Amino acid sequence: MTTAQTYDIAVIGGGFAGVTAARELRQAGHRVILLEARDRLGGRTWYEKDRIAGFDVEMGGGWLGDDEKYAMAEVNRYSIPLLRDEEAPSKFLWRCTAGIREGMLPVPFSQLGTLEAAIGRLQTAASRVSEQMFIDGTGLDTVADLDVPLPTLFEDLDLPAETAGVLEGFWAGISSAEWSQMSVLHAARLIAGSGGTFMGFMGTVMLGPRFANGTGELIAAIAQDAAVETRLNTVVTKIVSTTDAVDVFVGQDQYTVQAVVCTVPVHALRHIEFEPPLSPRKHEGLEAGHSGKGFKLWMAVRNATGGVFSLGAPGPFNHLFTVDEREDVALLVGFGPDDCPDPNNLDQIQQMLREYLPEAQVVAADAHDWRADPYSESTWAVYPAGFTTEYEQALRATESRVVFAGSDVSEVRPGYIDGAIESGIRAARDASQLTDPANLPEPQPAHAQAHAH
Ligand SMILES: Cc1cc2nc3c(=O)[nH]c(=O)nc-3n(C[C@H](O)[C@H](O)[C@H](O)COP(=O)(O)OP(=O)(O)OC[C@H]3O[C@@H](n4cnc5c(N)ncnc54)[C@H](O)[C@@H]3O)c2cc1C
């Protein structure tokens, strides 16, 4: 079926970037269609009630940071309740090549100075970057020396095992990959985005609130406010741009619009055919991809109550902690850099967990394999060495009448819900400029908008 020009703008992807862009466009007076491949909105956020041993969990993104201004603005706008986990864990575990240490201090007392020196390097790097650099590339050449693998920043410090383990574990957890797969520049940018201090950034990612009723509540609030035509189970396969229109193909079906906001994750974007082809630099960037490929694993566990917090590398979990407890069962979440473990293989998961908690008995586990999922093929965007200098501007650049958005290419805080929302707002503004409201066709009768999917 070919639709008439019933819509001005098509938004592809119904994650945070897509629903935000749809709302902004609709509120600017455009006729918008939202096309989503999955059978639900939310994308890489996915709240499931009663998913594991009676606990409700976020299978994807779930935590916010107090300094995430785009995400917090939406939370406040719709009065979305947040939850804070304020009870301190009773057990702190720190992993490194020498094994696991228990105690409050992340490194032995004698290594605190070395840890501070390493953190100082991160902060110095952060002091050299500005938000504007990533927005338009201004001055990016002055920090090209930072676009190198993260461990190189500490090479000459000769870090003792414990300090190296904690630093590596923290950054691998942030990376959803090995820490060598994150650029110093990316780490510096994240720290700069949290006031320029490492502790500020750590607070954002480790002490931030989560959604009391799940991310789905905010997604639904934005989508309801947007009130745009939405097609689920609708996989866009091809986008053809001409001088004054864009044809968006969903199998045999076609939507003709004046502009497109494409929020498809970088790794999934490789599967959409573009005519004319994407710029060579964007194409290379898509092929190179980002690093986020690890797992987030939920575990319902006996003999593990009292609250645990573990950080360090190497190990199956870079970061492991208690999220909830009910009677004698604790709900733990673990992040690791490797392929997603099979959540049905409780023996394997128990073995992984017992490296940290020898008495633990895993009664249930669950995870979504975001890397194997064709609509994400990754967890969250983490830029490896060279990525920002080589590809970032090109990946975000509008091509023909297609505006690119999503947290994978956001100007602010890439990889986070905050970045997804920022990119949706920015893309709506850019797409609006590609249309000319004075020349829009008359709205079609309602029956012409109906579309089977
Ligand atoms: C395990 C995990 C943990 C995370 N933890 C956090 C966290 O605690 N805090 C945080 O801020 N962030 C976290 N993130 C990252 C955060 O979830 C994402 O950055 C953000 O949700 C991405 O939003 P988006 O709209 O840019 O992309 P997505 O949510 O991926 O939305 C893109 C949409 O495009 C759709 N799509 C793909 N291909 C097509 C196609 N061909 N046609 C039509 N539609 C298509 C997809 O189905 C999807 O709905 C986490 C992510 C994961 C996976």
Image (tube, helix red, strand yellow):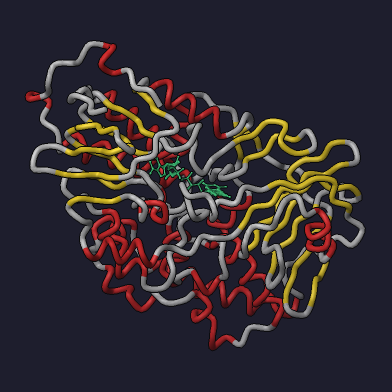
Looking at the rendering, in which quadrant would you find the N terminus? top left
- Out of 130 and 227, give the one closest to the viewer: 227
Residue drawn at x 69%, y 73% as measured from the top left: 314
Question: Which one is nearer the viewer's eye here, 331 or 151?
Answer: 331
Residue displayed at 50% across by 32% down: 39
Q: Is residue 137 above or below residue 446?
A: below
- Between 230 and 296, the residue placed more toward the observer is 230
Q: Residue at x 32, y 17 (%)?
A: 450
Residue 271: percent from left, percent from top: 36, 52
In the rendered view, tell whether residue 405 sits above or below residue 310. above
Q: Is residue 99 left or right of residue 439?
A: right
The quadrant holding residue 240 is top left
Q: Position of residue 172 (x, y in %)?
A: 59, 66
Residue 252 lies, with reference to residue 101, above or below; the image says above
Out of 256 and 399, give the one closest to the viewer. 256
Above-or-below relation of 250 to 191: above
Image location (x, y in percent) of residue 327: 89, 36
Position of the C terminus, as image quadrant, is top left
